[in-house]
Amino acid sequence: MTTTFPLGRPSQDHAHMPLATRVDHLDWPSLTAQLDDTGSALTDPLLTPQECREIAGLYDDATRFRSTVDMARLRFGAGQYRYFDHPLPTPSPPCAQRSTGACSPSPATGPNGCASR
């Protein structure tokens, strides 16, 4: 089942689904083809606006992060970014769930399938 989120965000029908289910419902054959063709792939948004606000609200709690990178110090512009420490927040950003397999629905069709070709 392929899920397309209208208006660039998960619909109310999909927002109640666990994040791993939303990831499973992505059009993995299309994403794999995009990766093969261009080296990158774009999904529809996976997080609801409320989930985004919840994760963004964690930014000021330094204890939630294992490291912080200061972009100006590295001469990459202004600002900073942080790497979450474990345990990851729930819902975890999809890229942070790779270690649990949430972003790899099957080795043949998911992002890990590219390594075997």
Image (cartoon, rainbow, N blue to C red):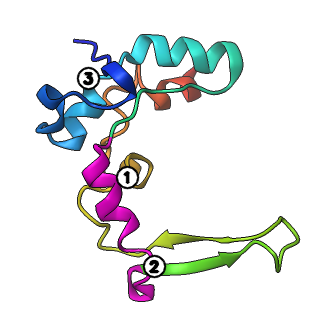
Q: Residue reaching furthest front? A: 7
- Asked if the residue at tag 1 contacts the one at tag 3, i.e. Cβ–Cβ closer than 8 Å, the answer is no
Image quadrant assignment for residue 67 = bottom right
Instruction: Judge left or right: residue 41 versus residue 84.
Output: right
Q: Residue reaching furthest bottom? A: 63
Instruction: Report which residue position mark 2 lands on.
Output: 65
Image quadrant assignment for residue 84 = bottom left
Instruction: Report which residue position mark 1 lands on.
Output: 93
Residue type, label 2: Phe
At label 2, counting other C-alpha atoms closer than 10 Å, the crowd grade (few under 14, some 14-19, many 20 or more) is some
At horizontal 60% and vertical 21% (from top left) the residue drawn is 35
Instruction: Report which residue position mark 3 lands on.
Output: 25
Instruction: Judge left or right: residue 21 versus residue 87.
Output: left
Instruction: Judge left or right: residue 27 versus residue 41.
Output: left
- Asked if the residue at tag 2 contacts the one at tag 1, i.e. Cβ–Cβ closer than 8 Å, the answer is no
Residue type, label 3: His
At horizontal 11% and vertical 39% (from top left) the residue drawn is 16
